[in-house]
Amino acid sequence: MKIGIIGAENTHSAAISHTINVNKAVRGFTVDYLWGETEEFARKTAEKGQIPNIVKSPRAMLGKIDALIVDHRHARYHLPAALPFLKAGIPVFVDKPFCYRSAEGRKFLSLARRKGVAVTSFSSLPFQQDFAALRQKVTELGGVVGAASFGPCDLDSQHGGVFFYGIHQVEMVLEICGYDVVAVQVTRHGGNGIGQLFYKSGMTVPIHFLKGWKGRFSMTVIGPEGSHHQALGHDKDPYLAGIRKFTGMFKTGRPPRPYDEILKPVQVLEALERSVKTGRIEKVR
């Protein structure tokens, strides 16, 4: 299957194409086309990933590819770029965050359902071996009654504020603690912040947004049988497990996760974004 990529500024585009084209770690797929935000971004990504064709317009890939990856730094550009390909019946992997506004995402996924076109989006973090170890530890602890996560995030990022990098921790917490978050609140101090996630059950989970932090993401979980802190490092190829997920979808036409689970992190991020501005508790709509 021939894959096209929209977006070359994000380093993920080069890493994904290198894994597929150079390392040949996933059989039956090649990245054949690329559109970049600038000529320089496109050229450098194409060189690193050995992508043979650079196009001047994303639509130039229509009719030439079997599947699409959309990979911008700012989530506001994701779905407008993917829409013509969805309408053409081409399966799409949208790098995280899926979108910048959940209303837009809901319409996009509704169209995907009607047309029977497979779509998915996710952070690579929950597919790493360290995260699998964390899941196993949660089972040993008898579940989760409390948790906290830590990681880099610039709440004032030009690429969407809390959406940029905040998505990793949000998806991590939802995967471990569940998706029934009803409200959030962000407290800022200096360049850092703490986002509290309030669950329907009464559980609260603080997310530590650490500006400039260069270390690993990590998470603490507390269960009936004790507690555990897990640093979340990357696999040798941190993209491979995720690539296998979305290329599997390209081949079978079956999304690897429910569409509600794609949209919920965006809804939580929207509420966090509102709370960054107001400092108040904001409901997850």
Image: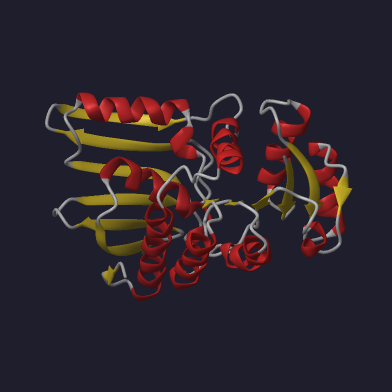
Q: Which residue is drawn at 67% across and 62% down?
A: 88
x, y percentage for residue 39?
Answer: 87, 57
Q: In the displayed structure, does residue 45 sit left or right of residue 77? A: right
x, y percentage for residue 13?
Answer: 70, 45
Q: Residue at x 52, y 66 (%)?
A: 111
Q: In the displayed structure, does residue 166 sit left or right of residue 25? A: left
Whether residue 199 can be seen here: yes
Snapshot quadrant of residue 251: top right
**Figure quadrant of the N terminus:** top right
Taking depth in this image into account, of 58 and 215 the one nearest to the observer is 58
x, y percentage for residue 18?
Answer: 74, 34
x, y percentage for residue 128?
Answer: 48, 30
Vertical side of 37 occupied by 234: above or below: above
Whether residue 161 can be seen here: no
**Figure quadrant of the C terminus:** bottom left
Q: In the displayed structure, does residue 82 sit left or right of residue 105? A: right
Vertical side of 10 occupied by 236: above or below: above
Residue furthest to the front in view is 115
Taking depth in this image into account, of 219 and 53 the one nearest to the observer is 53
Q: Residue at x 26, y 50 (%)?
A: 205
Vertical side of 165 occupied by 15: above or below: above
Vertical side of 151 occupied by 268: above or below: below
Snapshot quadrant of residue 224: top left
Q: Residue at x 37, y 58 (%)?
A: 264
Taking depth in this image into account, of 56 and 152 the one nearest to the observer is 56
